[in-house]
Amino acid sequence: MSGRRKNKAFEELGFELIRLNNKKPAAYCNICNKNLLNTAEARLRAHRNVCKIVNNDDASLSNLDACNVYETCFPNYEDEEDVFESKCVDISMKYNPITISTQANYDPINNKAELTRPKISESTRRSSLTSLCSSSEQLPTSGSCKRKRVNAIQNSTSSTHITQTLSQKEENDITKSLAQLFFGCNIPLTVVDSLYFKNFINKLRPAYGANIPKKEVLSSTLLDNTYEQLLTSAKATMTPDSVLLIDGWKNFSDNTKTVVSILHSTNGEKAFLEQWDLTAESDTYEKLADIVSESVHLAEKVYSTHVYAVVLANASAVEKMENITKHLVWNSNCSSSAGNLLANDILNREINLKVTSLLMEFKRADFEKEIIEKAGARIKLPCEARWCSYRDAYKFLIENEQLLKQIGVDKNVKSNVVKLLYDNQFLDDVKSNLLLLDPICNLIKKCQSNKCSAAEAVEIWLDLQLPKEFSEQLKSRQELALNKYALTAFHLHPFLNNLKLTDEHNNIIFEFLFTSLNGAGLEEWDSFKKKSGFFKRLYEKEIKSPLVFWSLAEMKYPNLAKIAIKLLQIPASSAQISRVFSNAENRPAFKTSKIMSYVYYSLRIKDVTEEKEFEINI
């Protein structure tokens, strides 16, 4: 037939291309004997999907019955079947008179089902047609529902399948995720037997409601399985060399003191080692040295990894600990901890007291509600030992000064507080302290990042600028952060500016490398400083990653490259431990089993989703 061409849907789905009396081409359906004016492939496929539903093997509602119904109800539509099909789907979805049973292969990862032909009962078809004929709703135009027809049917059937059926694999996956939720968030295991939790699961996935594990199963079989899976995974990802991170915090609510150690592998993976309760003990450098020794032994025993460096938050103990550990590991200071100490050094105590008392007055529920409504922010109070919280409190006060003045005049606020708000000298002092704290807090935040190395932290410290009256405090805290390991890592970083280093810094680097390298290594170091030989070719390649740079250099300069790669893998801070385990109210108690503690901390390590600022020192 000349004119409009056949598309592949004609042969695949059993349509014939014909000419009507008015010479227009049409598609003839061999199932329902309908002529379709729209012969596009998408239109034919949409018709065939609905045609299968309306016309099945049951002859009690024949093809002619279906055609007669929609021809009687919709005589004024050019393509009446479009309206009939869309209305059947709309009615079925709106009133949901039955449950459609579907054969499907469900994919829980992609959250979709591969549907086969659904079967709808005779009573359902008649009910849909009756509802269609009696409906007084305004009908859609001829092509308004064409694109949504198949999706509507598939979504309806797949949704029913997901909620009412459950494969063994799906059940196992859900149970595994449920166990990780309880253990990783330290949710009381009795919650799993709660009526409200069961109702929640039944609403979320009814098919799983009867399979919710009991508390006894959760605390035994599932806990053991989760422990084995986490331990096996951690062992597989640990590299032969790793860095030990140790940090701690105090929980003032129950007067406890906790220390935790984790491993930072050279490939960036982390693994939990151990926790210690120092509530009844003094966190002396001797005790911390014992913790380091125990952690190094555990790392070798459990993960078969050699600890070559330790990053510790307690800066005052690092130098003494190095003498105790007999140089078996490199002891590096935590850069963010040094930043916290610097912030503490420059804080104006008198200003702090005034700001705290002022904001506390507006912390009343009625005042704070009005502040939230008008400013869109909550009052941020300074917190002892979290020095950046003072910066946030100062910033809140300055940004909401006018609102606080308005509330102070309109409400019953203490006169001395209102007086502070109108004291220009006090407000200027707050602004000055804010300008001082802001760059220090930015330094702390950058150093706490999981991606920040000790070498990169050196550059951040070298770029920090403070007024001259604070030069002594800055120098003192820089000396803590810029230890010989961090400085040497900075020096061996191929893309950082060594011109920022002072003569004193260079002397520290020289002494460390001269002691650590053999004769061949010292010659390699000389080539690196001169950017000669193979180093010249590496620099010409403009390689972006320092680790890639040294991995390539290792072929020609193995002695220097080995020490460079280790130094460049040292994190800037151990504060990532505090970031992971900062929720003191929701950690397992020390009387909790070792397995439960391991599972909790291991899951929490994997749950770091955002960078936060923490300034907690042991």
Image (cartoon, rainbow, N blue to C red):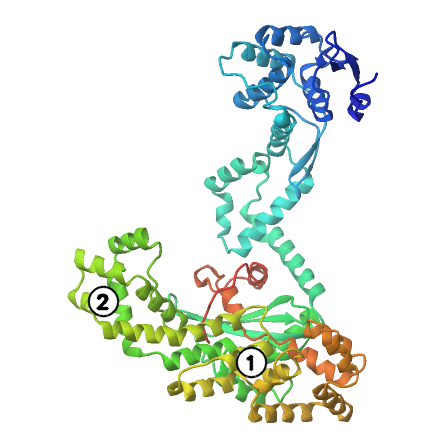
Residue 458 has which mark? 1
Residue 109's image quarter? top right
Can residue 386 be seen at all in this image of the molecule?
no
Question: Quick one: SS at disc 1?
Answer: helix
Residue 528, percent from left and from top: 72, 86
Q: Are marks 2 and 1 in contact (CB under 8 Å)?
A: no
Which residue in the protein does label 2 denote? 421
Find residue 183 and report its horizontal and vertical position in percent: 55, 55
Identify which amino acid the numbered label 2 is placed on. Answer: Leu
* Three-letter code for the amino acid on which mark 1 is drawn: Val
Q: Is residue 460 visible?
A: yes
**Regarding mark 2 in the picture, which secondary structure is present there?**
helix
- Find the distance from the CA under tag 2 to the CA under tag 1: 40 Å
Residue 224 coordinates in the image, percent (x, y): 63, 56
Q: Is residue 223 above or below residue 153?
A: below
Q: Is residue 463 left or right of residue 13?
A: left
Relative to 427, is 306 on the left or the right? right
Q: Earlier in the sequence, mark 2 or mark 1?
A: 2
